[in-house]
């Protein structure tokens, strides 16, 4: 089942986007099943759960942290995390830099944009993100290496609204690329699209999709 779901999604993505299989709340046995189907990139959103799975599962898995990350927990995942998707403050970026230095590595990071209508979602507004990049302060944190942007669309059935949210992020990506990363080819990742909205995300610049329930089924919280 899991293998079939991954194959179907991969066929839709083609070479346009990479798949992050979001395995939060699902047991290690299900991750192993996806792993055996060839999947290597997994997304988790709780540090303790990720630590357990990282210790237990094959070492060639590329773990992505996709949730809200508290600064005091960065140190636990800094030695191995492949990509942190949701950097939503200068303070978090500075802590990632510090812990990456300590671990003797560079940690790829995405800045999280808040483009959705909901108040509760974390992230920089477009204007806050623009001001942060303009300030150049992030250049003091080279071991937290900014390689792109991430966002979530409004949680709605209105596909026009979802498309508008992703397009807003996509427009800002192009602007940020031109203004702040013109010569940096590594600034390239656009992490948007989940189980219910990734086909729309793919039409609006996404090249990294985070898909959970469509692969693993409903989560038991
Ligand atoms: C849980 C989660 C996903 C996956 O959601 P699905 O609807 O199950 O695909 C994607 N991104 C983030 C940030 C998440 O927390």
Image (cartoon, rainbow, N blue to C red):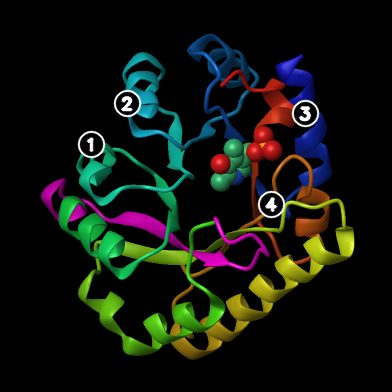
Q: Is residue 3 left or right of residue 25?
A: right
Q: Please report whichever mark, 3 or 1, sits nearer to the chain's N-terminal start.
A: 3
Mark in the foreground, 3 or 1 = 1
Q: Distance between the residues labelled 1 and 4?
A: 29 Å
Q: Please report whichever mark, 2 or 4, sits nearer to the chain's N-terminal start.
A: 4
Which region shows up in magenta?
100-120
User: Which corner quadrant holds the N terminus?
Assistant: top right
User: Which corner quadrant holds the C terminus?
Assistant: top right
Q: Please report whichever mark, 1 or 4, sits nearer to the chain's N-terminal start.
A: 4
Residue labelled 1 has its Cβ within 8 Å of some atom of ligand 1: no
Residue labelled 2 has its Cβ within 8 Å of some atom of ligand 1: no
Circle 2 SS class: helix
Q: Distance between the residues labelled 2 and 4?
A: 27 Å
- The image quarter containing residue 190 is bottom right
Circle 3 SS class: helix
- Rendered residue at 18%/51% (across/down): 99
Whether the magenta-drawn stretch holds residue 145 is answered as: no
In the picture of the structure, the residue carrying the numbered disc 3 is: 7
* Residue 147, label in figure: none
In the picture of the structure, the residue carrying the numbered disc 2 is: 51
Q: How crowded is mark 2: few (under 14 residues within 10 Å), some or many (20 or more)?
A: few
Q: How far apart are marks 3 and 4 (CA)?
A: 14 Å
Displayed-image quarter of ligand 1:
top right
In the picture of the structure, the residue carrying the numbered disc 4 is: 17
Whether the magenta-drawn stretch holds residue 119 is answered as: yes
Residue 132 pos. (x, y %) = 38, 81
In the picture of the structure, the residue carrying the numbered disc 1 is: 76
């Amino acid at each position: 089942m899991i293998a079939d779901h991954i194959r179907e999604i991969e066929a839709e993505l083609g070479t346009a986007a990479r798949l992050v299989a979001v395995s939060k709340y699902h047991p290690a046995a299900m991750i192993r099943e996806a792993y055996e189907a060839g999947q290597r990139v997994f997304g988790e959103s709780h540090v303790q759960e990720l630590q357990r799975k990282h210790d237990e599962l094959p070492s060639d898995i590329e773990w992505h942290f996709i949730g809200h990350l508290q600064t005091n927990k960065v140190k636990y995942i800094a030695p191995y995390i492949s990509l942190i998707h949701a950097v939503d403050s200068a303070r978090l970026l500075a802590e990632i830099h510090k812990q990456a230095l300590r671990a003797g590595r560079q940690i790829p990071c995405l800045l999280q944009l808040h483009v959705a209508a909901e108040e509760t979602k974390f992230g920089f507004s477009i204007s806050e993100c623009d001001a942060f990049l303009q300030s150049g302060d992030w250049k003091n944190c080279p071991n937290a290496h900014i390689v792109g942007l991430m966002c979530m669309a409004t949680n709605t059935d209105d596909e026009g609204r979802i498309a508008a949210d992703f397009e807003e992020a996509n427009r800002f990506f192009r602007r940020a690329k031109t203004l702040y990363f013109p010569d940096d080819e590594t600034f390239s990742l656009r992490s948007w699209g989940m189980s219910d909205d990734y086909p729309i995300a793919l039409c609006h610049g996404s090249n990294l999709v985070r898909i959970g329930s469509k692969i693993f089924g409903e989560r038991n919280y």
